[in-house]
Amino acid sequence: MTVEHTPPLVLPRGLIFLSSLWLIGSWIIAMGLRTPVQISSASYTPNFRLMLLCIAIGLMVAWPLLRLSQRLPSYPVLHIVLDLSVLVALVQVILWPLRLITPWTALRTAAIDATICGWLLLAGAVVASAVISRRAGPRNIAMVACVCMCVAGPAMASLGVRGGIADLELIDLSPLIAVHTLTEGGGAQPTPAQWRWIALLGLAALAVWATLGAWLLWRRRAAPETA
């Protein structure tokens, strides 16, 4: 009788390495290789804002593309959860030290943090729902969904500006627009409207993960009946 040995769930060292390379590239794109002539908060903050936008693109597009293009792992959903834990930890290490050189308050930094992590969790649920399948169709749909979540807001904003519509509240439902808006607030506290968008994002991520968990539980219970 043969016994199948399932490989253990290990820390995604490849993801950590590639994420580090993405962070280095984001830093070079945002900061360049030259020190600003006048070293101050005002001179560094725009560069940090650009760096966070590059990081958001990596979390919403590059990471899903990496996972959805790989073969089915032994523990698909747990693998994604472990990825999310690593990526959320990296965001904390990068974001909070920026308070030393930017005018962002603790609440504004927390709002930026919650926004980035909320969108990452939402993208993670989409990836987790597709990575359990070996078929290309669900994975392609999930990838398109992640790209749309990332670029739909800027596209709507661009169309709104060209059409003469300056106030489009729905474009805040985009990681790039939300991060751009929050990081330009300087030392002011986030507005109640911004907190409402963050709460809505958190509820959406919670609902998607709860739905995914319920569906996986139903699938596991239905499997013995169909076997």
Image: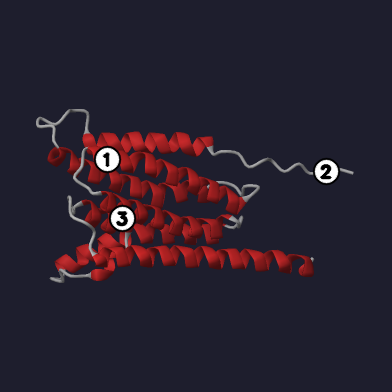
Tell me the quarter of the picture where residue 89 sits.
Answer: top left
Q: Mark 2 or 3, which is nearer the eye?
A: 3
Residue sitting at the far front: 106
- Give the residue at x 74% y 65%: 223
Taking the spot 9% from the left edge, 32% from the top edge, the residue there is: 38
Q: Which mark is residue 3?
A: 2
Residue where numbered disc 3 is placed? 111
Q: Could you say where residue 123 lies in the image, as x and y percent from the top left?
A: 44, 57
The residue where tag 1 is placed is 98
Q: Nearer the viewer, residue 96 or 62?
A: 96
* As drawn, 50 above or below 170: above
| Earlier-in-chain disc, 3 versus 1 | 1
Position in image of residue 143 (x %, y %): 45, 57
- The mark nearer the N terminus, 1 or 2, is 2
Q: Position of residue 147 (x, y in %)?
A: 38, 57
Residue at figure coordinates x 15%, y 66% from the top left: 162
Q: Residue furthest toward the top?
A: 34
Disc 1: CA contacts within 10 A as few (<14), some (14-19) or many (>=20):
some
Q: What residue type is labelled 1?
A: Leu
Task: Classify 10 Å Cα crowding around label 2: few (below 14), some (14-19), many (20 and above).
Answer: few
Q: Is 36 positioned to the left or the right of 118 in the image?
A: left
Going by the numbered disc 3, the residue's amino acid type is Ala
Are the two marked residues, 2 and 3, in contact with CB atoms closer than 8 angstroms?
no
Q: What element carries label 3?
A: helix
Determine whether the residue tagged by mark 1 lies in a helix, strand or loop: helix
Q: Which amino acid does label 2 sit on?
A: Val
